[in-house]
Amino acid sequence: MTQIQAKQFVAKRTRKAAPPELHSGDRMTREEFHRIYEKMPEDFKAELIGGTVYVASPLKDKHGSAHVDWAALLGIYKAATPGVGAGDSSTVILGGDSEPQPDLFLRILQEFGGHSRVGKKGYIEGPPELIVEVAYSSRAIDLYEKRGDYARYGVWEYLVASLHDDEIFWFDLRKNSQLTAGKDGIIRVHSFPGLWIDAKAMQSGNLNVAMQTLNEGIKSPEHADFVKRLAAKRK
């Protein structure tokens, strides 16, 4: 071996392997996805849906503003409902090929009979009962790929606030059916009684009106009964 060949050989042996990356369209298991994802920068966001990687696009003001309104609505409901937890863009481990980061979710806490829990590493494991996605560029993924994954892994209800359509899509995933708001324009979420959502107010960004409607729901007999049922299930 010549001196030049020897240097090339040493360089090849000592060259560091390129760090793993995630790209939209990559196919992998949840374990592989999670291992790579934990090494990515904190501001990087990607999801694994049905074994396929989806890397998030930059978000515009319209998405951010709507997200804040929805987060406020769910946060107030959570505060008024002992036994209910909420999440904002938290990683949820659903199964062997699914690790999404829903925009928002509500879940019944494990000690109150819920289907999800906080795992040893701090991630949510198992399906939240309600998931909300604010969709613009992600509309197709949210309405199809994610909807299928959420149904398959046991999410009860699913709301997609589609900014492109100016419409809120509401699904009962247990029955594989799409639901519609009442004649008064109010979405009365089944899995969380008292969570009344004024569809028009949310679509127009009128959070004051939406909060008035929510407060009516929180004062309703069905919400009071739900709180009692949760308390009775507490372990």
Image: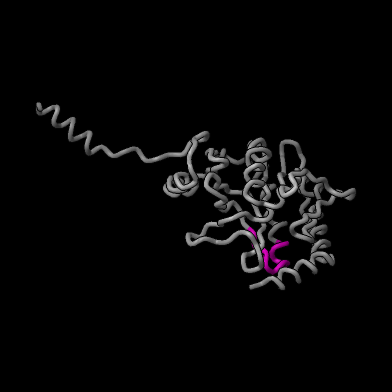
Residue lying furthest right: 183
Residue at x-position 68% and y-position 39%: 143
Q: How many marks?
A: 0
Residue 208 visible in the displayed image: no
Of 73 and 94, which appears nearest the observer? 94
Q: Would you say residue 83 sits in the magenta stretch? A: yes
Residue at 77% of width from left, 54% of height from top?
189
Q: Is residue 199 left or right of residue 174?
A: right
Residue 3 in picture, x, y percent from top left: 10, 28
Residue 101 is situated, as x and y percent measured from the top left of the image, at: 58, 48
Residue 177 % position (x, y): 77, 44
For the point 72% across and 49% down, the residue is: 174
User: Residue drawn 70% across and 57% down?
Assistant: 74
Is residue 41 toward the left or the right of residue 216 in the image? Answer: left
Classify the position of the N terminus by image quarter: top left
First to last magenta residue range: 76-86
Please tell me which residue lies in front, 20 or 61: 20
